[in-house]
Image: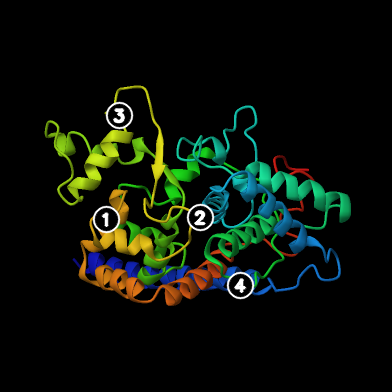
Amino acid sequence: MKGMASYSSSHGRLAMAGNLALFCLILELASVGLAHADELRVGYYSSSCPSVEDVVRNTVTNAVARDPGMPAALIRLHFHDCFVRGCDASVLLDSTPGNPAEKDSPTNNPSLNGFDVIDEAKSTLESQCPQVVSCADIVAFAARESVRIAGGFYYPVPAGRRDGLVSKESEVNQNLPMAFFNVKQLEDNFARKGFSLEDMVTLSGAHTIGDSHCSAFSNRLYNFKNTTNASDPSMDQTYVSDLKSKCPAPGSGQDPTVSLDPVTPRTLDNQYYVNVKSHRGLLSSDQALMNRADTARMVLANINSGSMWLHKFADAMVRMGKIEVLTGTQGQIRKSCRIIN
């Protein structure tokens, strides 16, 4: 017994020392991440490539003229990049033999778009400022231009990111929130990236533009919870009927898309929150925001002030653009966004 007591006491001291060392390591890693984010700055390319933001602006504007759905695609591209390995343009890398990349995850392929727009901007910038502007910064600028075009709101974007060298399909579903998540799962997912519950609700408002494949929510329309022909009772039934007219039952071999927001599908506004309150949130993760009192209050606040939400959205986008960034001599400036140098 005496020996056991001595072991327990010693083990306790070792555990405390180990925990302290781990805590110090976490603080060190966190401070490194913050230091990297602090190295980003507005006007980063003012001397090295002063045309960069104009080039991205013109490229995105022309792309939207060809495809009005492009703002949603570019905002989503930025989100999917930053939530996996940080904002390092890893989502742009092509798969290589033996290494399927992020863009080829079923979560991203074929629904993730905008790659050609980034390629076009990169090509122009390489001709003007060879190997100066990172693909990661181009993605951040393109997302900002998308907010400007779809929402009429401009915000400055700090730059100085460098491009990563690794992209793994297996890491996508480990990091991105899924369409079937409940509020707790969403909260935990965003918290791992340094975001609050309110940030999560704010960024969810991006679903006021863009489309979704029917397969992402068809379980809410047909045989809900294995009940024959039943739909999700939390959905407005008129909305269910409309969606069923556009989305065939699972097993048909067809997977069309519908607007995430049927009211203002091309305008970045607070209509998403009106839809959610009216039981017309398309994805389970959208409608889930009304299932908890705290997130429901945030939904109502965003309904009451669309301009406040847009300001919060822009602020959250800037902070999202700082997730686990590479700066200084880390990574590289890719010559092509699709392959490492």
> What percent of the width, then of the height, locates residue 8?
27, 67
Please give left or right for residue 170 compared with residue 130 in the image.
Answer: left
Mark sitting earlier along the chain (1/2): 2
Amino acid residing under circle 3: Pro
From the viewer's side, name the closer residue of 310 and 285. Answer: 310
Q: Determine the image quadrant of residue 133.
A: bottom right
Q: Contact (CB < 8 A) between labels 2 and 4?
A: no
Q: Is residue 334 visible?
A: no
Q: Contact (CB < 8 A) between labels 1 and 3?
A: no
> What percent of the width, then of the height, locates residue 304?
33, 76
Write down the residue under mark 2.
83
Looking at the rendered structure, the number of numbered marks drawn on it comes to 4
Element under disc 1: helix
Q: How is the image coloured?
A: rainbow
Write down the residue under mark 4.
155
Q: Residue 287 got which mark?
A: 1
Mark sitting earlier along the chain (2/4): 2
